[in-house]
């Protein structure tokens, strides 16, 4: 038994070293490691800050959604998560006037209608070609899953301890326009230097994702510099990428406690039964 | 057998029972997500209410719309149809209960209980035969069910599957269906617009 | 499964049933009373863990099929909407996705346990070979399942792996076209993979049945590798091993739950949260972790056909293993040289996995070549020679002797 333990420990240590090395190597050869800012939803008990999600939605709605779609999220999701109440969501959806197609009426005519809570967020462009044509050939990706699709850092150990860093990636890209390019790196017309960008180091998105200091006023009077807006929208996208995160963590806690109790009981039963085996 | 043996035994039994109980509770709780997943999902629930514009439905016309996957029949009844429905005596009805979500549960099956006051010409009901779920036809030549002697014959609904016949208020009069056609929950948002669900 | 049993029904219903379908007697004989060596350690619990994982995957999989749409335009969104809208969909989808990784962790431990204790040696050759078949079916099933969510890595993984078959001389290109049902991975491919991904787990369950049958004929191997000699050496499977396995399963479930609830994306690829795009290959494509050692071997060989042959050869080798190992001693515990080589093989496999996750550039390719070569040398050179050269430690005369000796040692050295 002692031997097994020592072997397991040796293996684990070797694995950790390997993993650490690999993490550093990979981080160096690709994008710059994201700034590790912290969010309220991190950790085993972390929850979303509803106020922050409201602000983040505003940033998305007023700024990001001019170019980016968010096809998997519906207005009703905002009510389900308690970001807005039912009436607010209904009014919000209806404020997207004529953005949706109604069912054909009796004469077969398809009319435009206002949004309903069950509708997904409207997309700014009809298709990828239209999006590219309006954005200098670059395709603004759909934001529904961006916080999970783009890791902020790599490495087996980094990701085990800190998660994949998706929200940090979004924050870092939005605030990463003011760094000096390394020598020899020049970005073409309509591109900006951004070392945090995954497809980088030149990015098609204009500086700070067109955010500006004080460019938006928040209803709760929260600070609204570029960094604040970037952080709020990163939190909002984290929520959008996994609306059930809070349910996952709270169920996880119950499951872990339950399994721990069951394991102890089963161990005692096993010990009792085996006591007369030899 | 000594007393310590006894104590040992009961301790052991307690341990086994406790473990079995904890394991059993866990198994039952684990089963729940796998059962619950078959219930309507959030996107289906979100579509649970729809709005319908009644203005295009002229007197004597009917439309069928889809609500929760089922047909809902909306008919703008003629004066004669309403009068016929009112004239029916409760004791002649096969199902004396209104089956109406716009009335109280268990109310008698008068025509008034199956429509909204002030909009008596509109009958809004599920196009789902209470026998086995087919869609009753409002245009079948067979729909002119034979009323109790002395009452007028007017159009109702006829179910093509097994021949159930409903009157102009959607109440079962003949055939195998046990209940009147159900009236779904709805309300008038304006004089010509209703919300179902 | 001879049907002979000392079971005597006591209730009236029991007698009635026993005369018609003696199913309880069969269960009692094969599962409850089955004589099992008394010295099995915790490495032996992974068989039970694997059976549980198969059930988890089938149950969660059947649920997912109820909500999934296998069409290139809808598959990605439908998987996402399962996690967003279906009641507990986020949980069931993650259990299935993470479950695949857990299944492979358990199967690798189970296989290396067999390698260490010589569980493949006579009279258990067929048991071992059925196990290798199970492993192959698992790999095929997991691969096709990974394609279904139709993310970027799903698509490009499918493209690369199906292209392996194009290495076959003459007929290769026709085979890939046949596999795809078109000129690339597309909707027909997705649909057939969906169909087969649903079918194969049930095939797997049947082959697992054969595996258990083949286990019941010679009975379990054990850490000493000494065959059971008398009733003294065994215990009935129930309650001794049912309880030991249950405890191990509970611990394993905690490990499983950690990933599902606290690091749900860790074992997958972030890029698979992006919908498949047949026009853009991701910068760095890698298979799921459980294929990485084979992927490293594939890329180590500078010839397309050669790489494919070496990769499949590394698995086929396991079929010949019972005859490659010439030692008369079964358990690695009593084979000092073999024991060292076994651990080197474990490390080689892990290193190959690590190299499989790296871009195939520079020295990495050379390391992969050396390690691949070592893998084959282990099986085709070291194992046959070792049996002739090695002088094993003395074996215990029986399982119960060994257990007694160990408990005496414990009693003498309580300070340990």
Image (cartoon, rainbow, N blue to C red):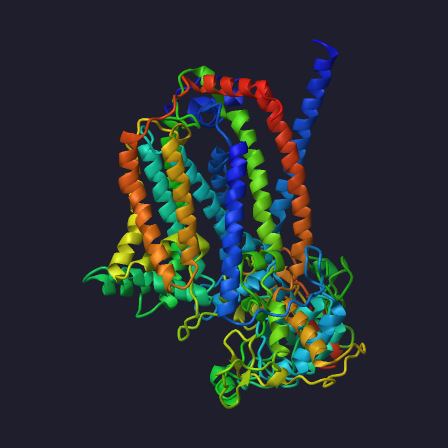
**Depicted A122 relative to depicted C138: above or below:** below
Q: Residue reaching furthest top?
A: B1
Please state the total of marks drawn on the protein image: 0
> Could you say which is closer to the camera, residue C252 or residue C78?
C252
Residue A22, image x and y in percent? Answer: 49, 59
Residue A272 vs residue B118, the one in the foreground: A272
Residue lying farthest to the left in this orientation: C170
Left or right: B45 as drawn, with respect to C298: right
User: In the image, is residue B46 above or below residue C54?
Assistant: below
Q: Is residue A256 visible?
A: yes
- Which percent across, then down, holds residue B16? 65, 27
Residue C401 in percent (x, y) is at 46, 16
Work out whether residue C346 or residue C180 is closer to the camera in this orientation and state it. C346
Image quarter of the N terminus of chain B? top right
Q: Is residue C118 visible?
A: no
The C terminus of chain B, quarter of image: bottom right
């Amino acid at each position: 038994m002692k031997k097994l333990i020592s072997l397991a420990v040796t293996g684990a240590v070797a694995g950790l070293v390997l993993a650490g090395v690999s993490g550093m190597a990979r981080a160096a050869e690709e994008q710059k490691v994201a700034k590790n800012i912290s969010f309220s939803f991190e950790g085993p008990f972390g929850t979303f800050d509803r106020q922050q999600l409201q602000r983040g939605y505003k940033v998305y709605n007023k700024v990001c959604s001019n170019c980016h779609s968010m096809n998997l999220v519906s207005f009703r999701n905002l009510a389900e998560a308690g970001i807005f109440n039912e009436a607010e969501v209904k009014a919000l959806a209806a404020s997207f006037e004529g953005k949706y197609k109604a069912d054909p009426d009796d004469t077969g005519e398809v009319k435009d209608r206002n949004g309903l809570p069950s509708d997904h967020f409207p997309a700014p462009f009809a298709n990828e070609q239209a999006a590219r044509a309006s954005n200098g050939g670059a395709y603004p990706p759909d934001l529904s899953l961006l916080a999970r699709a783009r890791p902020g850092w790599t490495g087996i150990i980094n990701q085990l301890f800190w998660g994949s860093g998706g929200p940090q990636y979004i924050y870092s890209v939005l605030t990463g326009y003011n760094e000096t390019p390394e020598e020899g790196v020049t970005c073409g017309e309509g591109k900006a230097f951004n070392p945090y960008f995954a497809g980088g180091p030149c990015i098609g998105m204009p500086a700070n994702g067109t955010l500006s200091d004080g460019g938006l006023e928040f209803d709760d009077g929260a600070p609204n510099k570029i960094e604040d807006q970037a952080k709020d929208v990163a939190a909002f996208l984290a929520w959008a990428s996994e609306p059930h995160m809070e349910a996952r963590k709270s169920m996880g806690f119950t499951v872990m406690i339950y399994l721990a109790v069951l394991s102890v009981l089963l161990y005692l039963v096993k010990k009792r039964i085996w006591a007369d085996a030899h | 057998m000594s007393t310590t043996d006894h104590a040992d035994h009961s301790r052991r039994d307690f341990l086994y029972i406790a473990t079995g109980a904890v394991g059993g509770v866990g198994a039952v709780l684990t089963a729940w997500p796998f059962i619950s997943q078959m219930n309507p999902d959030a996107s289906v629930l979100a579509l649970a209410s729809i709005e319908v514009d009644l203005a295009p439905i002229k007197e004597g016309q009917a439309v069928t719309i889809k609500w929760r996957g089922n047909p809902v029949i909306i008919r703008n009844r003629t004066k004669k149809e309403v009068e016929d429905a009112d004239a029916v005596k409760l004791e002649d009805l096969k199902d004396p209960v209104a089956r109406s979500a716009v009335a109280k549960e268990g109310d008698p099956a008068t025509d008034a209980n199956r429509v909204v006051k002030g909009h008596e010409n509109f009958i809004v009901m599920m196009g789902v035969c209470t026998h086995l779920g087919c869609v009753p036809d409002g245009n079948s030549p067979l729909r002119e069910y034979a009323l109790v002697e002395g009452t007028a014959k007017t159009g109702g609904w006829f179910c093509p599957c097994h021949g159930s016949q409903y009157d102009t208020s959607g109440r079962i009069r003949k055939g195998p269906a046990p209940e009147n056609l159900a009236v779904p929950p709805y309300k008038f948002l304006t004089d010509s617009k209703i919300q179902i669900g | 499964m001879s049907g002979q049993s000392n079971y005597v029904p006591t209730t009236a219903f029991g007698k009635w049933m026993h005369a018609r379908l003696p199913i309880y007697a069969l269960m009692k004989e094969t599962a409850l009373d089955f004589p099992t060596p008394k010295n099995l350690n915790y490495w032996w619990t992974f068989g039970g863990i694997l059976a549980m994982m198969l059930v988890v995957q089938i149950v969660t999989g059947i649920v997912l099929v109820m909500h999934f749409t296998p069409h290139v335009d809808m598959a990605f969104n439908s998987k996402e909407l399962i996690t967003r809208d279906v009641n507990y969909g986020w949980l069931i989808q993650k259990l299935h996705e993470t479950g695949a990784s857990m299944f492979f962790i358990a199967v690798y431990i189970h296989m290396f346990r067999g390698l260490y204790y010589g569980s493949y040696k006579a009279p258990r050759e067929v048991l071992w070979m059925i196990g290798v078949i199970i492993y192959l079916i698992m790999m095929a099933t997991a691969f096709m399942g990974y394609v279904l969510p139709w993310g970027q890595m799903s698509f490009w993984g499918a493209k690369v792996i199906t292209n392996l078959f194009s290495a076959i001389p003459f007929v290769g290109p026709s085979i890939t076209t046949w596999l795809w049902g078109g000129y690339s991975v597309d909707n027909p491919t997705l649909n057939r993979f969906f169909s087969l991904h649903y079918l194969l787990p049930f095939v797997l369950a049947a082959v697992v049945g054969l595996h258990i049958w083949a286990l019941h004929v010679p009975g379990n191997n054990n850490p000493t590798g000494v065959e059971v000699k008398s009733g003294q050496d065994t215990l009935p499977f129930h309650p001794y091993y049912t309880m030991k396995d249950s405890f191990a399963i509970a611990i394993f479930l905690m490990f499983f739950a950690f990933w599902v609830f606290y690091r749900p994306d860790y074992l997958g690829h972030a890029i698979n949260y992006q919908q498949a795009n047949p026009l853009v290959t991701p910068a760095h494509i890698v298979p799921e972790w459980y294929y990485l050692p084979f992927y490293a071997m594939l890329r180590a060989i500078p010839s397309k056909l050669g790489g494919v042959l070496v990769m499949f050869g590394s698995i086929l080798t396991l079929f010949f293993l019972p005859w490659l190992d010439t030692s008369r001693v079964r358990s690695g515990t009593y084979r000092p040289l073999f024991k060292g080589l076994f651990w080197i093989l474990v490390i080689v496999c892990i290193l190959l996995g690590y190299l499989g996750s790296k871009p195939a550039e520079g020295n990495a390719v050379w390391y992969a070549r050396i390690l691949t070569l070592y893998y084959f040398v282990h099986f085709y050179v070291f194992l046959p020679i070792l049996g002739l050269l090695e002088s094993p430690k003395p074996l215990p005369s029986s399982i119960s002797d060994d257990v007694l000796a160990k408990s005496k040692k414990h009693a003498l050295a309580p300070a340990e």
